[in-house]
Amino acid sequence: MPANYARYLIGTQRTAESNRELGFVLAFVAGAINAGGFLAVKQYTSHVTGMVSSLADNLALGQLGLVVDAGVGVLSFLLGAMCCAVMVNFARRRQLSSEYALPLLLEAALILCFGLLGAQLSRFEGLLVPFTVVLLCFIMGLQNAIATKLSNAVIRTTHMTGIVTDLGIELGKLVYWNRNTDHPLKVRADRKRMAVLAGLLAAFTVGGIAGAYGFKQVGYGFTVPMALLLAVLALVPTVDDLIRPRKAGG
């Protein structure tokens, strides 16, 4: 991948086009990790809604162990988002080029950690499930916060509920029949937004299929190309920050 394209995709200067293209990549990765994680521990970790509902249901049923599990998952997602905010604001205050690259590098490292340690812990279910759920929820919170920060909350990549809702709204506008075309409140669909929403949904779906097949065929090794993809995207801005002082001094 050319260095200039990596800077365009994950650099500090954001455009609607770079947000869209990076969003597609992150949605693909989220879909793959979410699907692969489910095959590993039979739990989805990309959305908090289900975890909160599980917490409420199991509290009513008196299943306190499962209540704790759900609560820890929500907390892990929250901590991932908090970690992203701290890293982005740290880099922003220092005017670093790696403002968004640093949390992306952390995500790549954690995905690789999931693959390497998950393979070792797969023989110990009592350790595998809590470790995997905590780690993947943290990763998903981290990634969702990255997409939210860089796009000013326009793009989300780890769960599709809002994406499908917004796509449905735009499709409703698209099929609306404006009998009076001169009406000041003429209904118009935002076709560019529709394309972005449909692209995010497609990327998440394709990523989920790739992750499911990848885990089925090669097990935890499917995480390696996911981690490498994110690392390649994030390395160029990070290296720019490392070499910039040397250039200035020399």
Image: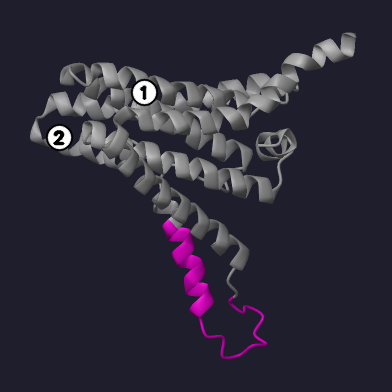
Amino acid type of disc 1?
Phe
Instruction: Report the residue that reaches farthest toward the right.
Output: 250
Can you tell which quarter of the image residue 249 is in? top right
Determine which residue is flagged by label 2.
58
* Magenta highlight on residue 41: no
Can you tell which quarter of the image residue 192 is in? bottom right
Instruction: Report the residue that reaches farthest toward the bottom.
Output: 179
Left or right position of 110 against 249 = left
Determine which residue is flagged by label 1.
114
Q: CA distance from mark 1 to mark 2?
A: 27 Å
* Residue 126 vs residue 51, the one in the foreground: 126
| Residue in the image at 49% along x and 33% along y | 143
* Residue 99 vs residue 222, the one in the foreground: 222
Number of marks present in the image shown: 2
Q: Quadrant of the C terminus?
A: top right
| Residue in the image at 62% along x and 42% along y | 152
Residue 225 appears in the figure = yes
The range drawn in magenta is 164-187
Q: Callout 2: few (<14), some (14-19), or many (20+) C-alpha neighbours within 10 Å?
A: some
| Residue in the image at 27% along x and 27% along y | 71
Amino acid type of disc 2?
Asn
- Closest to the camera, between mark 1 and mark 2, is 1
Q: Secondary structure at mark 2?
A: helix
Left or right position of 202 against 37 = right
